[in-house]
């Protein structure tokens, strides 16, 4: 079994940063927090992977999705 996307939430209001490691060479790990005032995600990937395009590319896509969601909810 291959988990290309592994996630975990940190529901603690006093936590400022949390991570979750990728468990597959071609996948991503996402540790995320949803608080009243913000949503935060820490994205990891294996640098040596040929298949994925890296955590920074995934982060940009996730940020775009969050921006679109905020725009939708505000309209």
Image (cartoon, grey):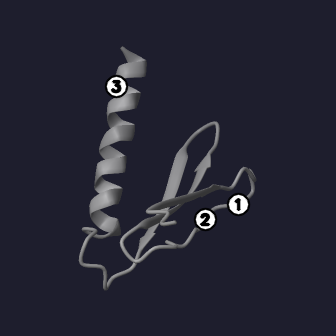
Q: Is residue 50 left or right of residue 18?
A: left
Marks 1 and 3, how far apart in space?
A: 27 Å
Q: Is residue 25 left or right of residue 54?
A: right
Marks 2 and 3, how far apart in space?
A: 25 Å
Picture quadrant of residue 69: top left
Mark earlier in primary sequence (1, 3):
1
Crowding near the residue tagged with mark 3, few <14, some 14–19, many ≥20 C-alpha atoms within 10 Å: few
Marks 2 and 1, how far apart in space?
A: 6 Å
Q: Which residue is mark 3?
A: 71
Q: Which residue is mark 2?
A: 17
Rendered view: 26 above or below 69: below
Judged from the image, the secondary structure of the residue bearing numbered disc 3 is helix
Spot occupied by residue 9 in the image (x, y as percentages of width and height): 65, 53
Crowding near the residue tagged with mark 2, few <14, some 14–19, many ≥20 C-alpha atoms within 10 Å: few
- Residue 56 is labelled as none
Q: Which residue is mark 1?
A: 15
Q: Is residue 15 left or right of residue 71?
A: right
Q: Are marks 2 and 1 in contact (CB under 8 Å)?
A: yes
Spot occupied by residue 34 in the image (x, y as percentages of width and height): 61, 44
Q: Nearer the viewer, residue 12 or 45?
A: 45
């Amino acid at each position: 079994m291959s988990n290309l996307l592994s996630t975990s939430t940190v529901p603690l209001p006093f936590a400022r940063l949390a991570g979750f490691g990728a468990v597959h060479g071609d996948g991503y790990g996402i540790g995320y927090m949803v608080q009243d005032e913000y949503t935060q995600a820490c994205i990891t990937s294996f640098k040596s992977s040929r298949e994925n395009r890296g955590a920074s590319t995934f982060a940009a896509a996730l940020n775009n999705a969050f921006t679109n969601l905020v725009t939708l909810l505000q309209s």
